[in-house]
Image (cartoon, rainbow, N blue to C red):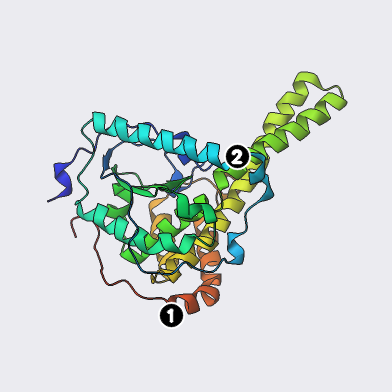
Amino acid sequence: MTDTHFRTDAQVDLPALARHADGCRCMLHARRRLGGALLGAGVLAVTTGLPAAAAEPECKRSGFAKLTGADQIEQGAGQQYRQMLQQANGQQALAPKDHPQVKRLRYIANRIIPLTYDCNPRAKEWRWEVNLIGSKELNAFCMPGGKIAFYLGILDRLKLDDDEVAVIMGHEVAHALLEHARERMGKTMATRGAIELGAALFGLGNVGRGVADMGGQLLTLRFSRDDESEADALGLILSAQAGYRPEAGASLWRKMLAASKGAPPQWLSTHPSGETRIHEIEARYPRVMPMYEAAAKPDQRFGPPNA
């Protein structure tokens, strides 16, 4: 069975809760429209015997997340995810669960997911799902509630090995564990409210609302960079504890950097630049290498599409 048996030209709207931040232009989250077929769907049954990891300092979540309800966001994400699947199915863009890359992604996910429970207790109740999207774009995401999707392009064009796939998956799962979507909503509520209150007190009127819009965007930009660094740190721990090489973090982002010619400078981006990210990841090796060395290693290995 080859990838050419599946449509890769479906137009599937991206769920709003799959976006990390408005205006994101990094390669991994550059074009959040699903311009391809979704390959394989279904609730993931976690069968691995890996133990849950003890909560790490990297699991600490922002207090801003408490300003919005987790249940509401997770339910909304589930609704949006199902709508995405239905839209793909309507275009005959769903592949069977025995697709080689679906098997690959679900195997890696089965090693990572049990490690999430102590990091965020809600994760044990999530109905985890893993899907593969037949698009040439370099992208992947994990929505609130454990709804994971990978683009075929990121596996195929970058010829990722399993360790690099695990780094991406760990990073995306970390966003969900740290409830960054919920945090971003809370921050937006707080920053806009504070700025508009100040504008009202000083009688700035419409000018004040304009300042609120600009200030909210700048604050969200900074928060998004922080979110990405947090997800890199926790994601590397998850993939290392699942038995995947931490060095894959640097090799992954070198491939990303080579593929991201023309990306905006770091200060205009919502994410750290590729070089900065590589240096930060390499600086974390002393912390995560002992975790990797102590971890049970995968008993199966897979290759990229058509390998």
Give residue 80's position: percent from left, percent from top: 42, 34
Mark 2 or 1, nearer chain start:
2
> Identity of the amino acid at label 2?
Gly
Spot the residue most to the top: 206
Give the total of numbered labels.
Answer: 2
Q: Residue at x 34, y 61 (%)?
A: 108
Q: Residue at x 79, y 20 (%)?
A: 205
Give residue 241's position: percent from left, percent from top: 44, 70
Q: Which is more toward the observer, 264 or 6?
A: 6
What residue is pinned by disc 2? Answer: 69
Q: Residue at x 52, y 45 (%)?
A: 264
Mark number for residue 293?
1
Q: Residue at x 73, y 29 (%)?
A: 211
Left or right, 183 with respect to 97, comes to right
Q: Residues within 10 Å of mark 2 (few under 14, many from 20)?
A: few
For discs 2 and 1, the disc positioned in front in the rendered view = 2
Left or right, 255 with respect to 70, comes to left
Give the quarter of the image for residue 233.
bottom right
